[in-house]
Amino acid sequence: MAQIKSVSDFLRMYVDGFKNMTWGRPLWVIIAIKLFIMFAILKVFFFPNFLNQQAASESEKSEYVANELTRPSQQH
Amino acid sequence: MEIDLSLVDWSRAQFALTAIFHWLFVPLTLGLGVIMSIMETIYHRTGDLKWKRTAKFWMKIFGINFAIGVASGIILEFEFGTNWSNYSFFVGDIFGAPLAIEGIFAFFMEATFIAVMFFGWDRVSKRFHLASTWLVTIGATLSALWILVANAWMQYPVGMAFNPDTVRNEMVDFWAVALSPVAINKFFHAVLSGWTLGAAVTLGISSWFLLKKRERVFAIDSIKVASVVGIAGIVLSMITGDGSAHQVALTQPMKLAAMEGLYEGEEGAGLVAVGVLNPQKEYGNDEDPFLFDIKLPKMLSFFATRSLNGYVPGINNLIEGGYPLPDGSEALSTEEKMQRGKAANFALMDYRAAKKENNTAAMTEAKERLDENFSHFGYSYFTDHAETIPNVPMVFYSFRVMVILGGYFLALFILVGILSWKKRFADIKWLQWVVLLSIPLAYICSEAGWIVAEVGRQPWAIQDILPVQAAVSKIETSSVAVTFFIFLALFIVLLIAELSIMFKQIAAGPEPVVNTKK
């Protein structure tokens, strides 16, 4: 097998590696499915950034969090 | 705060589920990384192809574990943004910086060199391949470092200053965060416990080959390397565990009291070797904390204070205060801390109000009050002293499970190591069964350690600064419950996938022998 002497050889290593994969193939399928579920389903539909929904700017987020954190004093 | 406690509980349960799942993969990555790297180093030095074959087999197990575990930690970051938004905003760049460094290391180092490790045999020099394998292991370990630095900061918040304008903590001393004694001990303890788990898994799988009368040479060689790594891992875990416990005594005395079921402090306190907690015991009643216990005299004082007669406060003392601290001052009561916390909370509210009115004099005055009392800010959220006590039985028993199993693995590794170097282990079937069946115990030991660290930290998200009920987002409890069960299903499926692929590859064994020397 050709030794790596250039960047293209290095990239060829990846291409050949993936092409000739045996036991690794189902793992890549699992990784792809997992990443799809995580980023395309869970992140989008179940895990929005909560603060981004409450406030648009950094100062508004500060105001929101300050309001939340000082609730004990507000109730006093 | 008007927070539904079931929301806090569901959010905690979801985070715990994700962290426990993630931690099934991390320690095996850390431990197997060292073991396969050592095996390839032996191949590099001897040129004996049997070691290349051995290293490649364990790399395959490493790869399966890595692939299923990879990115599962990112789910924790989703949860920070959705379920723990007050916390995420409040910690600011202190938590983000180590996680960002971790991401860079994880991506560039592991992703680059793991490809060379798997695809680069015969394409790069033996030396470069060996370097790549070690860099995969080092990369994984450095990833763990930054996660553990972030975690340690939550246990012992240092190197930061609170900015009332942004309502965020800002890092003022990176090295104080990265090199805090809590972080250093936690890093070494967690990584070395990974070596222990990796060794236990390697020994167990190798014993399976011996029981099946297959691959005897491969199995014995693997056992020799794993037993050495295991002994080093568990001995160093014990040393760093002692360091961690000492740090807990200094920085989180309530956690230590829960670990020991200690309600009344004493000088020359004994360490509970074996004990059964009294389920009737609660803070404030006169029940005996134990139904049964055997203590090692003075050892708790020694571990906590480095003095056989040092004073160790119990839960009652920590709440009542008044006992002498190591620096000579007197410990504050929880009531006093709650008053100071409320003063800090009021000061933050006053500061924000003064800022809106452009009243700089009032802002300065409020800022002074805030700075003076901020170290107890989190106590403002409590109405009952007992809220500051973690779940004592869970912490107490988890600590004992971890320590007892740690002792068990030390004995097992030494026994297996001696017998394998004397060439006798391969003929002792019952011990091979014991080693094989010990694999789950290594996971239980490892997870129990995290339960001690994280349940023992409760009720704090950030020690003394922010309790979990203030850290949580005000979202629907039902949505957290739904995602909890989605994760549970997803994790079970992934675990089944991993185990089935792993079992299949273990059964296939190492690649066929071609020749013996190269």
Image (cartoon, coloured by chain):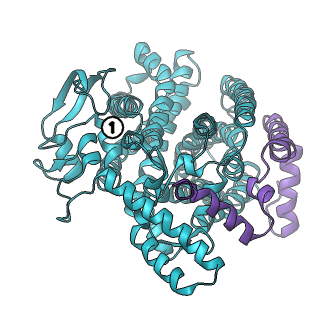
Amino acid at circle 1: Met
Residue at far front of view: A76
- B138 sits to left or right of B79: left
- B298 sits to left or right of B319: left
Residue visible at 58% across and 77% down in the picture: B354
The front one of B234 and B18 is B18
Quadrant location of residue A57? bottom right
Look at the picture and state if B401 lies above or below A49.
above
- Residue B186 image offset from top left, x and y in percent: 43, 53
**Crowdedness of circle 1 by 10 Å Cα count: few (<14), some, many (20+)?**
many
The front one of B366 and A46 is B366
- B246 sits to left or right of B267: right
The front one of B76 and B243 is B76
Look at the picture and state if B357 lies above or below B261.
below
The purple chain is: A
Quadrant location of residue B271? top left
The front one of B75 and B350 is B350
- Residue B290 image offset from top left, x and y in percent: 24, 23
Residue visible at 53% across and 80% down in the picture: B363
What element does badge 1 sit on? Answer: helix
Q: Chain B drawn in what color?
A: cyan
Question: On what subunit does the disc labeled 1 rest?
Answer: B
- Residue B108 image offset from top left, x and y in percent: 71, 62
Q: Where does label 1 land, which residue?
A: B259
Residue visible at 40% across and 23% down in the picture: B425
Residue B43 in view in this figure: no
Residue B504 in view in this figure: yes
Residue at far top of view: B430
